[in-house]
Image: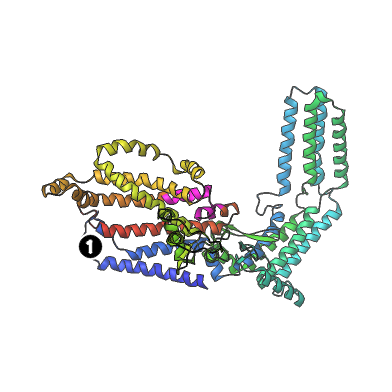
Amino acid sequence: MLTQIVTLLIFVAIIGSILYGRRLIKTEKVDAVFGNPERAKGGTHWVIVGSAAILLIWLYYSWDIAKAFYPKSANELCQVAKINDSLMGLKYQFPIDEREFKSTSIIKIENKNLKKIEKEIQNTPDLNDEQKIILLRFISKTSQLIPLLTNDYLMEANTKSKIKEMSEEIRILSSNFKKKDYPFETEADKIERLKAVSEQGGWGIIKVQSGTGSIENTIEVPVVPETNKGLKFHTAAEDLKVISDKFFKLRNHNSNFKTSIKGLKNEIKLYRESLDDSEEIASDYAKNIVKIARRIEFASIYPPGALDEMQSAIIEFDNLQKSEQGGLRLIDIILFPAGTIVASGPSCSEQGSGRWLPKPSDTFNKFILMSKPSVGYKNIPLLWIEMMDVSSIIGFILPDWIADILPGNYPVHTKDGIVKENFKGKVLKIVTGDFKLFKIPVPYGHIWDSFLRVFLGLVFGIIIGVPLGLFMGLNRFAKGFFDPLIELYRPVPPLAWAPLIISVLGIDNTGKVFLLFMVSLSIMIISARAGASGTQLSKIHAAHSLGASKRQILRYVIFPNSLPEILTGIRVAVGMCWGTLVAAEFLAGTTGIGFVENVAKKYFQYEVIWITIFIMGMLGLLFDVTLRKIIDKTIPWRGKG
């Protein structure tokens, strides 16, 4: 229901925003010339159109729209796929989906193989004349096996009877398939089927595995037929499979053929046994000839016209089952783009974009489950809030040495085993967080861990990189001294540093934050240096002439002119930090978005992979939007001279 409402709202939003945009173009007065940045401001309605279009494409190609509006369509298509699966083997024997009879194709291939071996034998100098004569005789006898199978007069009456019987069974199936009450289900069978339907769950439904707290999917597509139409196709598929199995067990082996092939195989066997090690080439040719004879033996080769009646019955049933699908075929074509539901034996699965592109509804449900502490991912939620005592935060921030530098000694127990606290002991409890105050909500989980690592790495990079970059842009010594150091490590990809840093600093947060600090530091230094060195000289001269000091020039002229470069550098650094963090968490980590994606890819958990991609995109967007707001507030003069 929710997906249906969202889909309708998306259509309304797209149409409404386009109409609003067209009306706005007609009524809005635009004085700005082409190229003026003012022309690109606003346009929230186009943001809505773009975002809604992306979501609509996701809903459509993940087949979530089909699931929302026709939730039983996948189950019905599963039953249709079972019929197609049963028909596939039979249709493969006839010029229905293929260009020619399977018998014709096999005969052409094996005759070609025999001619190829015959030519090789005649042109091989390693064989003597006697060996060539014997091998060519084997080829001749093998080629004579085929007419024994394709001769209608040699075909046994029992084989003809069985083919006719199977053809009649297909025609009876077609006749029954047309009837509305087919498959003549009894009340007991119906109760048993409905019970199985209630137990199998829905299409791609998500559930929590009891006891372990981990998330798992049920089968992709429920296989037990849920509707009368599905039951009709399911039953017909089972009947057709029985006929198909009977057909492929049948062999057109008349007495002449059996005698000939048995004699040929025995003759080749005796010949190979008579050869010594020096005649290995002749033995190999004889072996290849008998392989062709065996392929002919096990192939379904029949006289021309022997299977015409059966072919006609199969075509009749195939056309009938397509017509009986009715509106389901239209649903399949329109709402299942780039694929469909396919069957393999008793099970069904999604084949196409719906398989690798998770449905938004399933993805959202899994995200909710993974965010709960009771489920989470590897026993850690994606994002949750826990109540933490302020004392723990104080103990984390304040260093323990504050208590150590105070005069006096820590309390010592008395002979009665009592410890009386003194001032130094009380300070130690404060700096270590060993006290109770009040609790505040604190976020934790995989998302928070990744967010905090990026934030800390970025902050440290800004704190150190911006002053150093400004210093290098204004001082010859600083530029000459630090520039080689920065340029030495900057071109090296962050992943090249990751193994070394993680090995030295460990797989916990310290190593990851330091790696992100290295990534952001070089970007911030270069941005700040470019901003400082790019300040217009006329502004600096004007400040000097007005009597400004060096500090005032730095504070009111150089730094404001460097801000656009610095803030742009921060936006670049954010993207680089996210890419580096995910890679670092791939290499080593027990928490974080990269860790979740790394584990998910090993188990082909596509929903989880897409969740991590979406989360990274949203967090990156959050950083970028925040920086845009900061840029608009702090440097409104940007681009205005």
Q: From where the camera sits, is residue 437 visible?
A: yes
Q: Does the magenta stretch include residue 595?
A: yes
* Residue 78 vertical placement versus 563 (above, below): below
Tag 1: Cα neighbours inside 10 Å, few (<14), some, or many (≥20)? few
| Residue 628, quarter of picture | bottom left
Number of labels in the image equals 1
564, 171: nearer the viewer: 564
Q: From where the camera sits, is residue 353 visible?
A: no
The amino acid marked with disc number 1 is Val
Q: Does the magenta stretch include residue 588?
A: yes
* Residue 138 vertical placement versus 438 (above, below): above
Magenta stretch: dominant secondary structure: helix
| Residue 140, quarter of picture | top right
Residue 580, position as x, y percentages in the image: 45, 48
Boundaries of the magenta span? 577-598
SS for callout 1: loop
Residue 398, position as x, y percentages in the image: 41, 57
12, 120: nearer the viewer: 12
* Residue 621 vertical placement versus 235 (above, below): above
Q: Mark 1 points at which residue?
A: 30
Residue that protrudes farthest toward the bottom in the picture: 187
Q: In this view, does 596 lie to the left or right of 396?
A: right
* Residue 539 vertical placement versus 172 (above, below): above
Residue 319, position as x, y percentages in the image: 66, 63
| Residue 274, quarter of picture | top right
At 81% from the left edge and 39% from the top edge, which residue is drawn? 144
Residue 492, position as x, y percentages in the image: 42, 39
